[in-house]
Amino acid sequence: MRPSAAGQDREAPDRLGYRGPSACAAAGITYRQLDYWARTGLVQPSVRPAHGSGTQRLYSFRDVLVLKIVKRLLDAGVSLQSIRTAVQALCSADLAELSDMTLMSDGATVYRCASPEELAELLRGGRGVFGIAVGAVWSDVEGALAQLSAERLDTGEPVPVAHPGDELARRRHRTG
């Protein structure tokens, strides 16, 4: 797993869950999009799905990363069928390998490139038009989530939001 660049007081990303509003804020999508994507199976929360009215979905770090990538692919005009294929690739990959992955697309198909050689081969074939470096999206999501509310997966306890410039809050957190 990639080391955390976010606040040092924060838990490892694979131990935290994020409710809908935090997932939306970090991914840059609306709650309506989040709800629609979950109901249609495009990106479902892997930690806790909604079970009827009043229950809250809980998204993992990977889920939020995938949400942000889906948003970027949609904004670039990639077909929904290709996006579904990309989501499957992102969800089936080891979390540790995601930060080195690049997704390339010609608008119709999304290609998963895990090495510079695969990327070069795709470009030599003349198919790649644009790419998304998953590691860069990872950093964006990690930075955004560090400023948003989360909860521990093992206990359900809320995790304090990191405020890097707030020395008093850090001191209170250490003594509490």
Image (tube, helix red, strand yellow):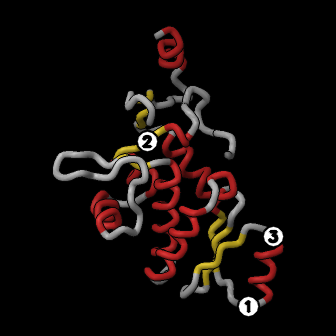
Q: Nearer the viewer, residue 98 or 29?
A: 98
Distance from the alpha carbon under mark 2 to that under mark 3: 32 Å
**Residue that protrudes farthest toward the left in the picture:** 53
Q: Residue furthest right?
A: 117
Q: Amino acid at mark 2?
A: Gly
Q: Earlier in the sequence, mark 2 or mark 3?
A: 2
Location of residue 24 in the rendering, given as x and y in whole percent from the top left corner? 38, 54
Secondary structure of the residue carrying tag 3 is helix
Residue at 34% over, 60% down = 34
The residue beneath circle 2 is 17
Sequence-earlier tag: 2 or 1: 2
Tag 2 secondary structure: strand
Looking at the image, do the residues carrying marks 2 and 3 touch, with CB atoms under 8 Å apart?
no
Q: Earlier in the sequence, mark 1 or mark 3?
A: 3
76 to 67, vertically: above or below? below
Q: Is residue 161 left or right of residue 19?
A: right
Tell me which amino acid carries mark 3.
Pro
Q: Mark on residue 116?
A: 3
The percent coordinates of residue 73 (x first, y second) are 51, 73
Residue drawn at (67%, 56%) of the image: 99
Inspect the image, locate mark 1, and give the three-letter code of the amino acid beneath it: Gly
